């Protein structure tokens, strides 16, 4: 199933609706990385609220999306990880290190707005985040 | 029960009384126990004291309980129904468990009563060996069942209390409190075992979700010791919270725990730690963009 990618101002929002195959995930990664450039997006939000399982491939793909998008000039935030999913991920050692996370879409947008503000304050085009 | 004839009064239900002969013997037995009630009761209470059972209770109390147990005992033998005895055993257990009466004492006194009664039967029927045998045949299964009922009742009551307390402790042990919009504190007190650690994490993650928390202060001032398992669990909790968008600040690490953690080499570099709860909350407020200011500073200067 293809994941719809919406454009909202400077941000791209990918809202995952159901469980994805590895191929779907790879497709999502390619589509997002390509569109970051096409729409000159400054931020990417991947909403995983609907996922009740997150395997290592999914986590790695999300991390890759974040790193690739950053190379293309956009900050990524993963939103909507369920409490049970978070706990399972941590136990499996899949901690999405170096990738921003937020509670839900609203929080994700607030986070990206914050990043944008910081950029302006620092007067630089890119912000390096740990 | 098929051998029961119609014209006779029905034998007690629920008991392993197969023939009317047994029923008659039991009736005789009950009559004997009723007749010698005072003397047998006293003998029993004496033997309880001598065996140093129920040391948590006074002699008068022992005698009073002995009387009730005795009457219930005889009644169970007579009616063959054990519900009343069961209820009494539960009630008795409820009263004596808080006073520290142990299982072996309860089993001990019931077995003593069994012995006292059996002795009195020996004394009464020692001339008619055949009759004694038949009386004992009727008495023993019933007496065993009575002993069983009381002992099981006691143990069940004890287990119920233990379960209840565990439940209470579990509920008490993981309060997640909101101190400010989007700021939660989780004070941890006491020993953390794997089960509790897991429950703690689950509760915290759920609370982050429902309260839409951004910052969580975990205060472990009340945790006396920490091993690598618990430390790793704490790290996992911090990471899982981050996945939900929450920042965790750990406060109140005692000098002992700090030394242990460094000695056993737990990697806490990912964790934000602040000395005490106050500092933790101040740091959290800073992250959330709050600043606590005395009211005078806000008042317009005259």
Image (spheres, rainbow, N blue to C red):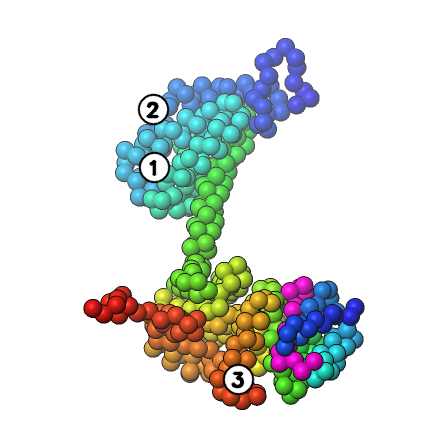
Coordinates of residue B208 in the picture (x, y in percent): 51, 63
| Front tag of 3 and 2 | 3
How packed is label 1: few (under 14 Cα within 10 Å), some, or many (20 or more)?
some
Compute the Cα span from label 3 to label 2. 95 Å
Which residue is labeled 1 in the image? B47
Give residue A79's quadrant in the image: bottom right
Residue A119, numbered circle: 3
Of B284 and B189, nearer the camera is B284
Q: Residue at x 74, y 76 (%)?
A: A28
Range of residues picked out in magenta = A39-55
Q: Residue at x 54, y 89 (%)?
A: A124
| Front tag of 1 and 3 | 3
How packed is label 3: few (under 14 Cα within 10 Å), some, or many (20 or more)?
some
Which residue is labeled 2 in the image? B38
Magenta segment's dominant SS is loop
How packed is label 2: few (under 14 Cα within 10 Å), some, or many (20 or more)?
few
> Is the C terminus of chain B in the top left, top right, bottom left or bottom right quadrant?
bottom left
Residue B207 in sight? no
Disc 1 sits on a residue from what chain? B
Look at the numbered discs 1 and 2 and tell me whether their residues touch, using CB distance below 8 Å: no
Look at the numbered discs 3 and 2 and tell me whether their residues touch, using CB distance below 8 Å: no
Of B200 and B111, nearer the camera is B200
For residue B164, above or below residue B176: above
């Amino acid at each position: 199933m293809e994941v719809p990618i919406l454009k909202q101002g400077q941000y791209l929002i990918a809202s995952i609706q159901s469980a994805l195959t590895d191929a779907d995930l790879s497709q999502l990664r390619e589509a997002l990385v390509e569109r970051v450039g096409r729409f000159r997006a400054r931020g990417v939000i991947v909403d995983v609220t609907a996922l009740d399982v997150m395997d290592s491939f999914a986590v790695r793909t999300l991390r890759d999306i974040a790193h690739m998008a950053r190379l293309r000039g956009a900050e990524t935030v993963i939103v909507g990880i369920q409490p049970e999913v978070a706990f399972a991920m941590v136990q499996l050692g899949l901690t999405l290190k170096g990738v921003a996370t937020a509670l839900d879409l609203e929080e994700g947008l607030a986070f990206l707005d914050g990043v944008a503000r910081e950029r302006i304050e620092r007067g630089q085009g890119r912000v390096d985040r740990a | 029960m098929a051998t029961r004839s119609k014209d006779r009064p029905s034998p007690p239900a629920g008991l392993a009384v197969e023939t009317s002969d047994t029923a008659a013997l039991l009736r005789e037995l009950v009559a004997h126990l009723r007749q010698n009630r005072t003397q047998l009761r006293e003998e029993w209470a004496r033997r309880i004291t001598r065996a140093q059972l129920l040391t948590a209770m006074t002699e008068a109390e022992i005698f009073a309980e002995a009387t009730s147990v005795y009457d219930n005992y005889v009644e169970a033998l007579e009616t063959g129904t054990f519900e009343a005895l069961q209820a009494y055993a539960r009630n008795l257990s409820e009263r004596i468990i808080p006073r520290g009466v142990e299982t072996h004492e309860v089993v001990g006194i019931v077995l003593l009563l069994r012995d006292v009664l059996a002795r009195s039967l020996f004394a009464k029927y020692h001339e008619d060996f055949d009759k004694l045998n038949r009386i004992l045949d009727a008495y023993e299964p019933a007496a065993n069942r009575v002993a069983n009922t009381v002992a099981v009742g006691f143990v069940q009551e004890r287990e119920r209390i233990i379960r209840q307390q565990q439940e209470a402790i579990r509920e008490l042990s993981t309060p997640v409190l909101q101190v400010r919009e989007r700021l939660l504190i989780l004070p941890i007190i006491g020993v953390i075992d794997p089960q509790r650690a897991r429950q703690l994490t689950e509760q915290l993650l759920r609370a982050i979700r429902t309260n839409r928390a951004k910052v969580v202060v975990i205060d472990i001032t009340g945790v006396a010791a920490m091993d690598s398992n618990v430390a790793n669990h704490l790290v996992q909790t911090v990471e899982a919270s981050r996945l939900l968008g929450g920042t965790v600040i750990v406060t109140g690490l005692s000098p002992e725990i700090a030394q242990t953690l460094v000695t056993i080499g737990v990697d806490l570099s990912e964790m934000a730690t602040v000395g005490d709860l106050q500092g933790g909350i101040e740091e959290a407020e800073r992250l959330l963009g709050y600043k606590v200011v005395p009211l005078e500073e806000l008042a317009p200067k005259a």
